[in-house]
Image (cartoon, rainbow, N blue to C red):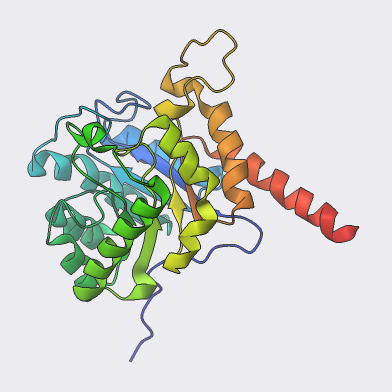
């Protein structure tokens, strides 16, 4: 019997994996439909790979606060041609979806990871797709869809509560037959979290080690970074938050997370390289 392919790419010893975002949506908070048509999205994915991205995360539904959901047919129309157009590169492809039907079609088209921001809660069939296909499954902490999630940012202790709720989502996946080796957890920055709660989660990333699973973090361009670096208090638009994102990526590399999800790949590698160089200098002394 042939050996089963790994469900997840291995993390390099010297840095986290870099997951590049390919939004195939007209209403993304970060790039506003810049790569909405399939050809543009495929070209953008190839550009991210050329810059060194280890994984491409392809999504057809905006999950910004207040976003409305596309139909299943529309989501499929957006993402499947892009996955098919990039599958031949040999890259690790992730499908960013909350729908089991979309995840199953994406895996059939060449995706190897399912990045479910609902962590299996939005569609009860999602964990079954992961179990049946053997695809990697990113389980993100989640409390509700975009139109309501920010009303649910109420915690007794945000770090302890997120870890406890994530543990329950992980157990649900395991109970559905997903192997532990397929699983990744994500604290869900910005999803039912206030800015202050996001910073607390980043400060206490080491606490997530108790889940004994790889950790993916996506802080890229999110609104809690909009005033980082501002001297006049003005909020920067999403496409001008890459400096702040790179600074957070330094923190994530120092925390040895499994992967960092970003829109801008070059600055993320620069952040990781800074941490690598500092560690090498420390080892040489």
Instruction: Please tell me in which quadrant of the rendered image residue 33 appears.
Output: top left
Would you say residue 62 is visible in this rendering? no
Image coordinates of residue 6 in percent, x first then y, are 41, 73
Q: Is residue 255 left or right of residue 199?
A: right
Number of on-image labels: 0
Judged from this view, the residue extending furthest toward the right is 285
Tell which of 74 and 140 is nearer to you: 140
Residue farthest toward the bottom in the current orientation of the protein: 1
Q: Is 125 left, or right, of 39 in this rendering?
A: left
Q: Residue furthest front?
A: 156
The correct choice, above or below, for 204 with respect to 6 in the image is: above
Can the viewer see residue 103 in this picture? Answer: yes
Task: Indicate the quadrant containing the N terminus: top left, top right, bottom left or bottom right.
Answer: bottom left
**Residue 34 placed where, x, y %?**
34, 25
> Residue drawn at (45%, 57%), measured in percent from left and top?
215
Seen at 30% across and 67% down, the residue is: 135
| x 37%, y 57%: residue | 163
Residue 186 spot, x, y in % from top left: 39, 52
Rendered view: 268 above or below 5: above
Q: Residue at x 28, y 42 (%)?
A: 59
Residue 226 percent location from the top left of the image: 47, 22
């Amino acid at each position: 019997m042939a050996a089963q392919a790994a469900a997840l790419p291995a993390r390099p010893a010297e840095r986290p994996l870099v997951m590049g975002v390919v939004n195939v949506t007209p209403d993304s908070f970060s790039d506003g439909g810049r790569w909405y048509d399939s050809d543009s999205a495929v070209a953008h994915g190839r550009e991210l790979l050329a810059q060194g991205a280890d994984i491409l995360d392809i999504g057809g539904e905006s999950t910004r606060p207040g976003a409305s959901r596309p139909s299943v047919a529309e989501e499929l129309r957006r993402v499947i041609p892009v996955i098919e157009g990039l599958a031949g590169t040999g890259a690790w492809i992730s499908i960013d979806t909350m729908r089991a039907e979309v995840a199953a079609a994406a895996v059939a088209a060449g995706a190897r990871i399912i990045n479910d921001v609902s962590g299996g809660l939005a569609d009860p069939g999602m964990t079954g797709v992961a179990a049946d296909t053997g695809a990697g499954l990113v389980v993100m902490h989640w409390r509700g869809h975009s139109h309501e999630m920010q009303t649910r940012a109420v915690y007794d202790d945000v770090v302890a509560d997120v870890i406890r709720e994530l543990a329950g989502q992980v157990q649900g996946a395991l109970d559905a037959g997903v192997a532990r080796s397929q699983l990744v957890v994500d604290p869900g920055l910005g999803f039912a979290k206030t800015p202050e709660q996001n910073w607390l989660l980043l400060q206490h990333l080491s606490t997530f080690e108790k889940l004994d699973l790889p950790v993916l973090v996506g802080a890229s361009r999110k609104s809690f970074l909009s005033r980082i670096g501002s001297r006049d208090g003005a909020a920067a638009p999403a496409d001008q938050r890459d400096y702040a994102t790179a600074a957070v990526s330094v923190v994530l590399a120092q925390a040895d997370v499994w992967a960092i999800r970003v829109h801008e790949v070059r600055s993320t590698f620069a952040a990781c390289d800074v941490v690598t160089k500092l560690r090498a200098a420390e080892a040489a002394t």
